[in-house]
Amino acid sequence: MISYKEKIADILDPQIEGLGKEEIVAMIESPADSKMGDYALPCFKLAKILRKAPPMIAKSIAEAIEGEAIFEKVESVNAYVNMFVSKAEFAGAVVGDVLEKGDAYGRSDLGAGRKVIVEYSSPNIAKPFHIGHIRSTVIGNSIYKIYDFLGYDTIRINHLGDYGTQFGKMICAYRRWGNREDVIKAPIKSLLSYYTKFHEESEKDPRLEDEARAIFTRLEHGEKEEMELWQWFRDESLKEFNRVYDMLGITFDSYAGESFYSDKMPRFVKELEEKGLLEEDKGANIVRLDEYDLPPALITKSDGSTLYITRDIAAAVYRKEHYDFYKNIYVVASQQNLHFQQWIQIVELLGYDWARDCVHIPFGLVSMEDGTMSTREGRVIFLEDVLNRAVEQTKQIIREKNVNTENIEETAKEVGIGAVVFNELSNYRIKDYVFSWDNVLNFEGETGPYVQYTHARACSILRNAGEEIVAKAKAGFDAKYITSETAHTLSKLIYEFPDVIVEAGEKYEPSIVTRHVVDMAQAFNKFYHDEHILVEDEAEKVAKVALVIAARTAIKNGLGLLGMKAPEKM
Ligand code: ARG
């Protein structure tokens, strides 16, 4: 696909002495108001180079280029050159390109040959997989899809929280108050209840803490009985997590979590020591980071055990050595900002020049309408329950609305879960948001169901058009029939889609894709309402159907990047 900005820059180049083509490309704007043209050149900056008043410059540039075939009209308004592209040529190029590329429309090879790790979800085993985890899980999955679409070689890692002194407590509690059947029936709920009981009891009897510590030491030394219990807790927890991942259609390439690094840490403790970075503090080892305005980081406790941060240092180096990443992305809540600042700084101090290729992508909090969830008070909202409820409610809506579908179960799943995912990706990730059922499942707002419904509507138009017309559209069409303002607005949004993906990747911001998908859906619906698509005249019908195919394709690819399905009937 040709780049219109580049094409225009080629035309402008001879008019603007002293600026290179790249600089001109960067100056060209896409005005939000279409009355100012499809593209505009502000001439303020040119005043110095061309030594004339900006409106004069705009006027002479406009006159010089207005005859070019790619323009329908060129105007100068004050200091701006407003350029209107020839709509037929534009629609022909854009729609033709989408029809040719199909599912690959928007794909690129920008990242070819470069490995990007996306670490996301990363829940703690034997702990609830709650609504708060939706954020890392869904945002991370979308970032992975965006990077994959941009041609990067991607690796998805679930850095499970499966190690630490709490497992000593859990094993201790299980032995005292647990039972096997309950764990098999409801692993996380049962393990959590033992863990809570441990905390209650250890307040009365502090000796329990010593017992737990001893058990953890046995686990660290790989003693068979403790290892087996730990492995079993991990397996059962993963089964539960995987039910949710299945619902969301999410998979990982690696589940190497914290425990994976348990034997890889001594090397870094030694490296830190050799570099003179380690300082003893009451038997513990710390790294001072005062120079970087950060509090000291605790690397080993006085009993020699390592910490969360030590494992992150080991994990980063392992990943570099094992995968040789170009970027190592961590999709983790903003509450952990300090943690990431500290360990990335330490990796840099160790002399690893790739330290800043590790990027923390933070996000804000989610809370429920009826107050935040709190693990301590037991008011946990399980993610699985939220997804199930979304599917159930969608089923009801489908029945009430007489939605056109052959398989209610399947459609309710795609729409209900899609609705939750879309809602999650609708705001800038850094913002806190409140989960509201009314917003999520609204079929009319800027929601997942609305976009999916728009996609299904496009599919329905294509079914009504019939295979023959669809085949003709794919073979060629006369773009003069799709030059109305509404058609042009739609074509423009479709044209921008590939750039939107690049921007979303650069900013690690799936909401940019979400926003654009909504814009495309709204523009499509306007086109659908304003124009008669399946008209008598075959040439006109074929051209309009071509635009419908293009819109459908772009919307579907966009939904795919968010991790959503695009049902064909709804
Ligand atoms: N398991 C941690 C938690 O639930 C998140 C892990 C984030 N990843 C990392 N490499 N530290 O808070």
Image (cartoon, rainbow, N blue to C red):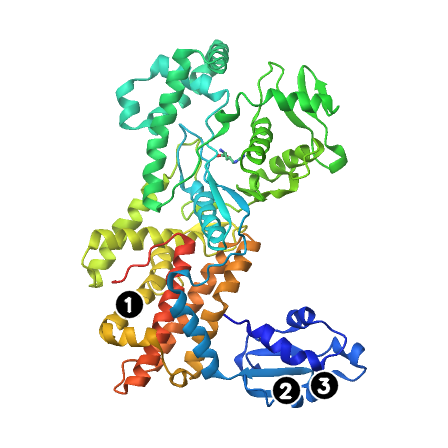
Q: Which x, y percent locates residue 491? A: 44, 75
Residue 328 visible here: yes
Q: Nearer the viewer, mark 3 or mark 1?
A: 1
Q: Disc 1 marks which residue?
A: 459
Q: Disc 2 marks which residue?
A: 65
Q: CA distance from mark 3 to mark 2?
A: 16 Å
Which quadrant of the figure contains the C terminus?
bottom left
Under mark 2, the amino acid is Ile
Q: Secondary structure at mark 2?
A: helix
Q: Which x, y percent locates residue 223? A: 44, 11
Q: Taking 63 as reference, is 175 left or right?
A: left
Q: Which mark is residue 55?
A: 3
Q: Nearer the viewer, mark 1 or mark 2?
A: 2
Q: Give the camera-side residue of 548 and 445.
A: 548
Q: Earlier in the sequence, mark 3 or mark 1?
A: 3
Q: Give the camera-side residue of 338 and 141.
A: 141
Q: CA distance from mark 3 to mark 1?
A: 48 Å
Q: Earlier in the sequence, mark 3 or mark 2?
A: 3
Q: Earlier in the sequence, mark 1 or mark 2?
A: 2
Kindly identify the residue that appears in the image at 71 percent across and 82 percent down: 15
Q: Secondary structure at mark 3?
A: helix
Q: Residue 183, located in which quarter of the rendered image?
A: top left
